[in-house]
Image (cartoon, grey):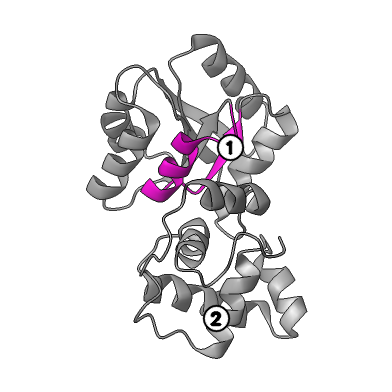
Amino acid sequence: MSTGVLVVDDDELIRIGLRAIIDAQPDLRVVAEAADGAEVPPLVARHRPDVVLMDVRMPGIDGIQATRHLLATSADPPRVLVVTTFANDEYVYEALRAGASGFLLKRARPAEVVEAVRVVAAGESLLFPAAIRQLVGAYGPAGGDRLRGARLTDREAEVLRLMSTGRSNPEIAAHLVVGVETIKTHVGNVLAKLGVRDRTQAVIAAYESGFVTPSGPA
């Protein structure tokens, strides 16, 4: 089955370019396009995309508001991949905090666009861990409490630290010398205990709580 993608950007040329890149892949397809965040909820309800490529800055409803609304109102929301001109941007950080799973630069090469969509759809690794670490260091509030009371086990805490480096489940499994299914279970437990939807949100919570520090190794 192919991965359905909704492309949201107020620039028609950007939408055309992203559609051409995505539709050229046998396993990906653009199911709809939108020029404003206000169009996202009805299009998601109608087309049920797996991934939304969401421009972070739009003149009407921007990507932050659209992401927050989508994740709050949809019973089974798609993954959101923010599309941005600048990586080190507070808008990008706020979109990630709102629930986006990662971000993609508008100057990214076609192969990077395709890989980003696939990674976000699979949900098994973290996009650009070093860049996300820098965003949290620049804009993240100190002393967040999302890890307080989570009661992670020692192994779950270790898995969260490794997740923050951007390692995939197989890479974490190899590092800890355990099976991939065991790591999937630990990751699921971490997400459930933190009350977050995916790895990106878990890592942001870890940084904001001081559990992982932005100055640490990526």
Residue at point 60%, 59% (across, down): 214
Q: Which mark is residue 157?
A: 2
Q: Which mark is residue 124?
A: none
Q: Position of residue 3 (x, y in %)?
A: 54, 41
Which residue was labeled with disc 1?
88
Is 17 rendered above or below residue 2? above
> Callout 1 environment at 10 Å: few (<14), some (14 to 19), or many (20+)?
some
**Which quarter of the rendering shows the C terminus?**
bottom right
Q: Position of residue 34 (x, y in %)?
A: 39, 21
* Res. 121 in view: no
- In the image, taking residue 139 as reference, residue 18 lies left or right, namely right
Residue at point 52%, 52% (across, down): 136
Residue at point 67%, 52% (across, down): 130
In the image, is residue 198 part of the stretch drawn in magenta?
no
| Amino acid of disc 1 | Asn
* Depth check, front residue: 216 or 82: 216
Residue at point 63%, 39% (across, down): 27
* Depth check, front residue: 73 or 164: 164
The Cα atoms of the two marked residues, 2 and 1, are separated by 27 Å
Is 125 rendered above or below residue 107? below
Span of residues in magenta: 86-105
Please tell me in which quadrant of the rendered image residue 159 appears: bottom right
* Depth check, front residue: 82 or 51: 82
* Res. 117 in view: yes
- In the image, taking residue 6 as reference, residue 110 lies left or right, namely right
Is 50 rendered above or below residue 176? above
In the image, is residue 98 part of the stretch drawn in magenta?
yes
| Amino acid of disc 2 | Ala
Q: Secondary structure at mark 1?
A: loop
Is 26 rendered above or below residue 141? above
Q: Position of residue 146 (x, y in %)?
A: 37, 69
- In the image, taking residue 105 as reference, residue 93 lies left or right, namely left
